[in-house]
Amino acid sequence: MGLRHASFIARTVYVRNNNIEEACGVLNRIMGREGLFEQFRRTRYYEKPCQTRRRVNFEKCKAIYNEDMDRKIQFIMRKNREEPFPGCS
Amino acid sequence: MIKSALRLLASPSFKDRLLSPSLLSEGGKFTGSTNIWRNFHATTRCQKAEDKKMMLASLPPVDEGTKGEKSIQIDNLLSSSEILFPDETTPFRLHDGTPYKDLPICNIKVSHNNTIISLTDCHGKVQMIHTCGKEGFKNTRKGTNIAAQATATTFGARTLRSGIKTVRVRIRGIGPGRMSSIKGLQIGGLDIVSVTDNTHVSWTPPRPRKARRL
């Protein structure tokens, strides 16, 4: 078992109590979160450079939007206000 | 364009259609051909691409065996750290009297059109092989989850008969048979110790085939 591409060490989940669904779900979730499935699907067919640019630009915009929206939500949800319900008194 | 329109005017059916409403209002004798209508386009249809897009969007999503890929509940499960992942003692852990590293491996190759299952020993020597095509499914039916499950069930039973009960599963690729083949192995009676993913993913692949035109 070489360490560089160690099989059965990386991307491996044990099956507990013969619960296949759970093990597969965990494996899929980890693979999905790491973006492996996404990359696999994308490289199934050639992506033209213009499509790559388009996708990258879209991802950039989405990341900016998500970041801002997260900040907004955190701002609304913060709990250390002096007055708990501002504007309602 | 004008020429083609004129040609259409000269054709009897078009003339008929033009004339028929007036005839209807007069006496209504020729009711037989008035029901036949056909759209007349002077140019190509503009909405064709949109129609196709809508049709594709309305199709049910293809099962790729990646259930749970986007579910957030599993994140909570992961953070509870009850899931077992391999560590340095894993190769020597005993399963049914055999250390993990000496367990036979069940390799499953899943593609969009087929599922191939093979059983190897711990060194990678192939002992048994079975595919959806061998099972009797032909053409498109090979690439379904039902075919994969049936194949895996048969394969599991055959493996049991050859005296092997405990296996570790190594799965490669995404396709309809990804989940169902593992389930089929279990139904076939095999005891699955672990599930490993061996999908080949590269960030600098050789140029893939050209994109499908939908």
Image (tube, coloured by chain):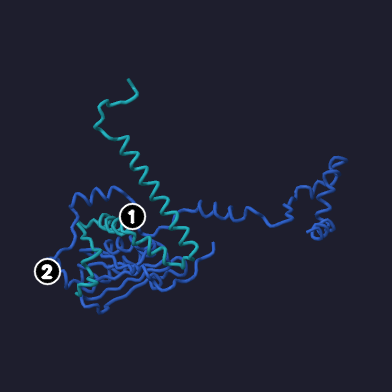
Chain colours: A cyan, B blue
Q: Chain of mark 2?
A: B
Please identify the quadrant where the C terminus of chain A is shown. Answer: top left
Q: Quadrant of residue B165?
A: bottom left
State the residue in front, A79 or A25. Answer: A79
Task: Determine the residue located farthest toward the top in the rendered image.
Answer: A89
- The residue type indicated by label 2 comes to Phe
Q: Which residue is mark 2?
A: B92
Q: Chain of mark 1?
A: B
> Distance from label 2 to label 1 (Cα)?
31 Å
Q: Given this view, does label 2 or label 1 mark the residue nearer the observer?
A: 1
Residue depicted at 41% across the width and 53% down the height: A60
**Above/below status of B56 relative to B137:** above
- How many marks the image carries: the answer is 2
Residue depicted at 29% across the width and 71% down the height: B107
Residue depicted at 20% across the width and 75% down the height: A2
Q: Which residue is mark 1?
A: B69
Task: Determine the residue located farthest toward the right in the rendered image.
Answer: B26
